[in-house]
Image (spheres, grey):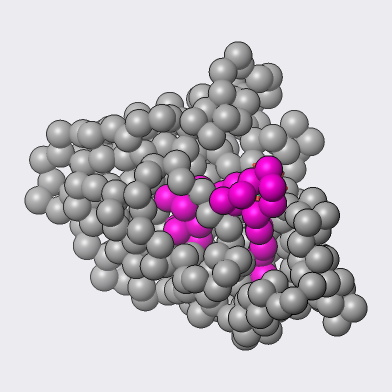
Amino acid sequence: MSFTALDPFLRIDPFLREAGMEDSLRNVVFTIAHAGKYVAHTIRNENLDYVNSTNESGDEQLALDVLSDRIFCNHLHSSQSVAKFASEEQEEAVQITCSSKNPYSVAFDPLDGSSIVDADFAIGSIFGIFPGKDFLGKTGRDIVAAGYILYGPKTIFVVATEKGVWEFTENAIGEFVLSRKNIALAEEAQFFAPGNIRAIAEKKQYENLITDFAKSGKSLRYSGGMVPDIHMMLTKGSGIFLYPANKNRPKGKLRLLFECAPFAFLINAAGGMAVDEHGNNLLDKVIIETHQTDTILAGSKKTVEQAVEKLGSEK
Ligand code: P6P
């Protein structure tokens, strides 16, 4: 038995208390981690059929999407520390009467990448936690904690605060215990995850960039799931994830509130950077609408800067 199973102070709640996370925020983080365990069980035991509905972004919904959304909503309703939440699966945000003196607002994507779960690919849930009773009008710099749950061969919970990025792995008795701390990204990427590759039909610079990555010996790692693809580079200690715009997605595909801002916060906490395809820091983007999308280049700082320069260069 590994030592982590024996050391109770490496479980999420005691560890984050020792790390100085205040009670209400720790309650929200623990609630989200607990919801993730239910989602993991649902993925492995429920049907993968589509239901006859689409979400606000127009994506067809799996029964899993609806179930996962309900799990997160029920957990957040019960937390007593959440005043508002928004789900990538729902059109409108939900206000909750909250008794806490320290309320938080949570944005979450309950099941990101559900279109690849039928192939048994790893997928994830994403969350961003803002102080106070709203996130509209705020930016990623207002986030106080963000992270994801990765549903792969293991269920892994990663959370970032201004103090760093920590990874917790579900152990044999279903507890999340600390498995990595102070996760950091090197300046240069050894891996690249080129999303929206179809954009090379319009963006010669994107084709040139990907070709340069390959010619310079970087390893291509792209699954179509943002959570595993970013977890990959956080695990290996370097990488760049890209999702530029194209004519069908002129403002990009990924949602600022549910995907780009939480990952920008987390990657920044790991010493990397996250920008849009023009080089604007995603942490500075104001959240105007719940479902607004953006483009993203995120990961090892120097490689991201080089990628922005290449994308902005002449054909
Ligand atoms: P494409 C999944 O649908 C998702 O939102 C992200 O998890 C992923 O990075 C991206 O879309 C994949 O998009 O165009 O490659 O299918």
Is residue 84 shown in magenta?
no
Which residue lies at the image location 39% right of the left edge and 67% below the top edge? 284
Which residue lies at the image location 29% right of the left edge and 57% below the top edge? 138
Q: In the current view of this chain or complex, which residue is farthest to the front?
A: 314
Residue 84 vs residue 102, the one in the foreground: 84
Quarter occupied by residue 73: top left
Q: Provide the residue span drawn in magenta.
A: 240-263
Which residue lies at the image location 23% right of the left edge and 34% below the top edge? 95
Which residue lies at the image location 26% right of the left edge and 70% below the top edge? 20
Quarter occupied by residue 11: bottom left
Q: Position of residue 253 (x, y in %)?
A: 60, 47
Is residue 252 shown in magenta?
yes
Is residue 50 depicted above or below 30 in this figure?
above
- Judge whether residue 153 can be spotted in this image: no
Left or right of 132, for residue 272: right
Q: Position of residue 63 (x, y in %)?
A: 59, 21
Left or right of 195, for residue 254: left
